[in-house]
Image (spheres, grey):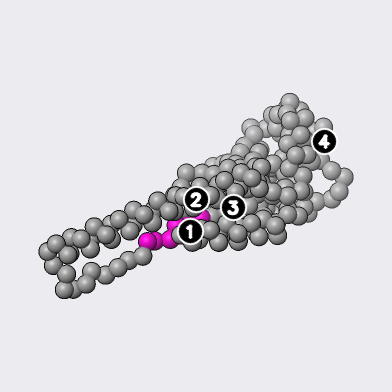
Amino acid sequence: MYTYAFLPNSDDPLDLPEGISGSLQLVAVNGIAALVEPGLSLETIQISDDVLMQAVLCHDQVIREMFEQTPLLPLRFGTYFVSRQGLMEHLGAHWTEYLDKLAKLQGQAEYLLKLVPLAAPEFAVPPDLKGKDYFLFKKQDYQTKVDWQRQQRSELEKVLEAMAQRCPQWTCTEPKDGVERIYILSDRQYEPLLQDWVKTWQSFCPRWELSLGEALPPYHFV
């Protein structure tokens, strides 16, 4: 049974979106519910790369739409229980753990802070430079780039120090193509304050471009 997320089992009605290929349902046990797509098999979403990618995007969209209605614990794409009974047994064994996590995440959202490194200034070699002057220019140009990278690292450390003081819950992944990605868990009502902090951090990080993403389900904090 394909499963998207765990959420509180509430009397409040929820508007369930369409799933990857069919309708969604809730399977509930002891106050916790699983959002499932009963008719979906993993084989049907693996027939081609295009179908698989579309399924990944749909999985994420379902979780985002539900997140706007209720706290939830998002599950990884491809999470599958072999039977309804197996899912219910899992919920029965872990319902207190999941409800505790949901209580802690009430009103919280995940924000992606992205830091894109800016390239060091480029200086064209004067056409009349030769010999010793040419090699001196290249040496200075190399040193400029080394200094730039050192200052970038220093600026990044300042951001991390500021985050440690302001944001009690955050995590980061390995940089990709030099881009730093930091995931922050914050109360949604403090989003304007978080945006102000990012502006402040940008002011002492001229060698980085900082951007804060929209409120997302707590993918990295479940």
SS for callout 3: strand
Q: Which three-letter amino acid code belongs to the residue tagged 2?
A: Leu
Q: Which three-letter amino acid code belongs to the residue tagged 3?
A: Leu
Residue 112 got which mark? 3
SS for callout 2: helix
Position of 67 compared to 219: left or right? right
Quadrant housing the C terminus: top right
Residue 212 visible in the displayed image: no
Q: Does label 1 or label 2 sit earlier along the sequence?
A: 2
Q: CA distance from mark 1 to mark 3?
A: 15 Å
Between marks 4 and 3 in the image, the one whose residue lies nearer the viewer? 3
Residue 208 got which mark? 1
Badge 4, how many Cα within 10 Å: few under 14, some, many 20+? Answer: some
Q: Quadrant of residue 29?
A: top right
- Circles 1, 2 touching at the beta carbon (< 8 Å): yes
Residue 37 visible in the displayed image: yes
Q: Does label 2 or label 3 sit earlier along the sequence?
A: 3
Q: CA distance from mark 4 to mark 3?
A: 31 Å
- Circles 1, 3 touching at the beta carbon (< 8 Å): no
- According to the picture, the residue beneath numbered tag 4 turns out to be 31
Residue 167 got which mark? none
Quadrant housing the N terminus: top right
- According to the picture, the residue beneath numbered tag 2 turns out to be 156
Q: Which three-letter amino acid code belongs to the residue tagged 1?
A: Trp
Between marks 2 and 3 in the image, the one whose residue lies nearer the viewer? 2
Q: Does label 1 or label 4 sit earlier along the sequence?
A: 4
- Circles 2, 4 touching at the beta carbon (< 8 Å): no
